Amino acid sequence: MASLAWRNLFHDKVRFSVTLTGIVFAIVLIIVQIGLFLGFSTATTAVIDHSGADLWIGSKHVPYIETGAAFSERKLYPVLATPGVETATKYAVRWSQWKRADGSNEGVLIVGFDPDKPPGGPWNIVAGDVQGLKSPDAVMIDTFYQQKLQVKQVGQVVEIEGRRARVAGFTQGIRSFTTSPYVFTTFKNGQNYAQLREDQTIYILVKAAPGTDIAALKRQLAALDADVDVFTTAEFSRRTRFYWMFTTGAGIAVLLAALMGLVVGVVVVAQTIYATTMDHLREFGTLKAMGASNRYIYRVILKQAVLSAVIGYAVALVVSVFVVRGSESGGAAILLPWELGAAMFFVALAMCIGASVVSINKVTKLDPAMVFKG
Amino acid sequence: MKTPAIAVRGVTKVFGEGDAAVRALGGVDLDVARGEVVLLMGPSGSGKTTLLSVMGCILHPTAGSVRIHGREVTGLRESELPGVRLENIGFVFQGFNLFPTLTAAENVELALDLKNVGGREAKRRTRELLELVGLSDKFDVYPEDLSGGQKQRVAIARALGGDPQIVLADEPTAALDWSSGRTVIALLRELAHERGRAVVIVTHDTRVLGFGDRFVHIEDGRIVKEPAAERPHMVALEPPAARAALGAD
């Protein structure tokens, strides 16, 4: 015999569709909100996280990557001489102005790195290559910002901070949290575009030799110069993320939206599951009168909740994948890492089972004598 | 004398407290024997359904004693009552109370499932029960596609699913035309007379009088009339077994 839970759910297709829609809406809402938060959060530190560096040396108390103050490039040499340092390179991240074809200016973030030493370059390159950036005016931008920067193809000549620049390649999927696109170029070009003096750098990226104790190396480098701070990549990433997410209102707003998504999702699911149980309240009363134990009835209700969660989750995941794909061409990236997808299964289960507990409470208090009322 | 299937002694049921208290039953005594059909009648609000609920271990009496097959049940914990109902009592409701999402056969199987009877055995017993109530051709039909009489017969089959020795029916003919009602009431009577169940039927319907072995009139929570002598038209319709049972009273 098909279980009562299964039949209660699927017998009335319209009712089930409404239930499923509620659950799917709730799960998609939560995924989108959390995905947005992750998207924003990841965008704030993408350049740091993809740098490939082990340690970052920046100006004292630098709060986040975009505000590093320039310091003398001579600080690079004692770093290079420190045991355990495999390579150390100058690195610049600084605001600049990009002149669009229509003559208007657009703020950009110049990322200047050494193309011959790995840490700090662009990734997801879809046109051109890093070595192509060695030309005195070569830059690389993301395809996502082509329209914004009015760039049609590789080779197009533009102007950055009054200097000639030539688009030598494109990346894909490197978005900035701010509205300013990243512009990758060599450190030397970056100095020009970001109006940095020739003897200055903004960061020094350190790659440790294999087997080096990173924490010990960090302490050693910090002891070299009291005017700079040394961070591991993870620390600097956290610092930057924390700044954007929690010091500015932007991140808090996104986080609150994610929390609201969770709350609204839970309420929608709770209401939906509760309504499903209430629809069958008289039948649960009949079951009680027939001698069913509370445990038997709980099992029916929980089975309904689990079935709803599993089906709702599966549909929601498919819908979410489409939403995430759609967001790739939009202004706000929504990330759906597999961990979030997997976690949402348990969230969906917890929501549905949690909601059914409210119904269980109602059924527990149900007077079986109700079955005699007409 | 045999132990009655149900023995009610001095049962009182009061709903609410203080000024709002309502006395639904006041000192009711009643025995129901196996193989007997007892008709419980009386005006609305007289306490018929309350008495049925107390006999069915759905309501605890405020005072008095209820014995099911000699076992005192008034002192049992709330959590123990479902077990007593499951083992001893089948219910037939005025509104049928079938599960609309289950077929006729599945409604019956559900009662068996409650007693952990599943698989082929459940199928076999379901078939027997639906054949017993004359619905062998309605196995896979949902309640919404059954007539009122057919629904009530499925409900009776379901009530018998757990093989109870007591069947309590609350206004089983109220929602039926007389033709269907008569079939249903005859079926309940057959359960008592041919299968030895104790059957109690709460009813307003005077047309069913001829199908009972005993008639109990209840007013204001008290049994006011029970003598067989006052309903000669019933005695004429009673089969010998029932008359014997009445004689024993």
Image (cartoon, coloured by chain):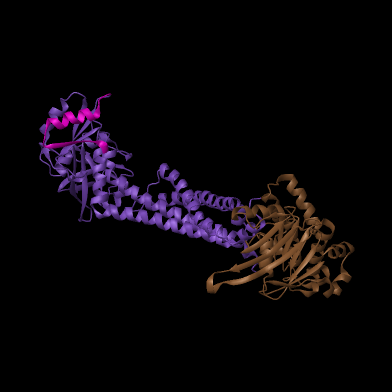
Query: Left of A67 or right of it: where is A358?
Result: right
Q: Which of these two is toward me, B74 or B124?
A: B74
How many labels were placed on the picture? 0
Q: Residue at horizontal 21%, vertical 43%?
A: A65
Q: Is residue A364 magenta?
A: no
Q: Nearer the viewer, residue A165 or A324?
A: A324
Q: Which chain is brown?
A: B
Q: Can you tell which quarter of the image residue A80 is in?
A: top left
Would you identify the image quadrant in which residue A209 lies? top left
Residue A198: image x %, image y %? 10, 37
Assess whether residue A224 is covered by the magenta stretch.
yes
Whether residue A85 is situated above or below residue B126 in the rendered picture: above
Colour in which the image shows chain A: purple
x%, y% of residue A227?
11, 37
In terms of depth relative to the viewer, which is nearer, B67 or A359?
B67
Residue B103 in percent (x, y) is at 70, 57
Q: Is residue A279 visible?
A: yes
Q: Position of residue A172 (x, y in %)?
A: 33, 43
Q: Which stretch appears magenta?
A: A211-234
